[in-house]
Amino acid sequence: MFFLLIASFMMLVTMAQSSDAFYGGPYIMKQQVEVPASCAKVVVMSNPLMSGGSVKLKNLETGVICTLYGSVTYVDKWYFIVPNGSYEVVEITSNYVAHINAQGIGVGSIVKFSHASGGYVLFEPK
């Protein structure tokens, strides 16, 4: 019985890991995670105060919401893997200004990520 319980748990863990295969992170820059052609590598730079910041993005095709956030752990940059496509900005952490792909953004802005060009996010305190 115990073995069956452990096997069931391991199967659930494996399924959870595989469902995150196309959206994951944060990964430190030294981690070599394979990015499928259907996904983009989005690098998040920390602000000088290492005080975080986050943005919630809604995939316009699937409706899935993902959250990208800055480091508060003195890791100067890391990355996320997100599906290619267009995203609507649905929320930005209060007291922060966010830039995606070198453009200032606000709630309602549309941003695009692709495997070919990846993406870049920066948070700055207001």
Image (cartoon, rainbow, N blue to C red):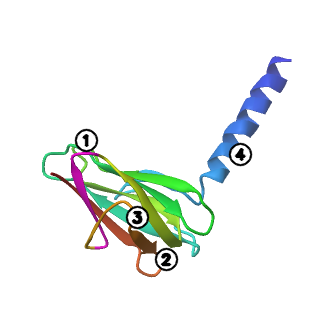
Q: Rounded to the nearest whole Å, what is the CA distance between mark 3 and mark 4?
A: 33 Å
Q: Earlier in the sequence, mark 4 or mark 2?
A: 4
Q: Rounded to the nearest whole Å, what is the CA distance between mark 4 and mark 2?
A: 24 Å
Badge 4 is on which residue? 15
Q: Is residue 105 visible?
A: yes
Q: Give the mark toward the camera: 1 or 4.
A: 1
Badge 2 is on which residue? 115
Say if 86 sits above or below 65 in the image: below
The image quarter containing residue 119 is: bottom left
| Quarter of the picture holding the N terminus | top right
Residue at the right extreme, as displayed: 1
Q: Tell me the kind of residue under disc 2.
A: His
Q: Is residue 33 visible?
A: no
Residue 99 left/right relative to 64: left
Q: Tell me the kind of residue under disc 3.
A: Gly
As drawn, the label of residue 108 is 3
Q: Which residues are magenta?
A: 94-101
Q: Position of residue 113 (x, y in %)?
A: 45, 73
As drawn, the label of residue 72 is 1
Q: Earlier in the sequence, mark 3 or mark 4?
A: 4
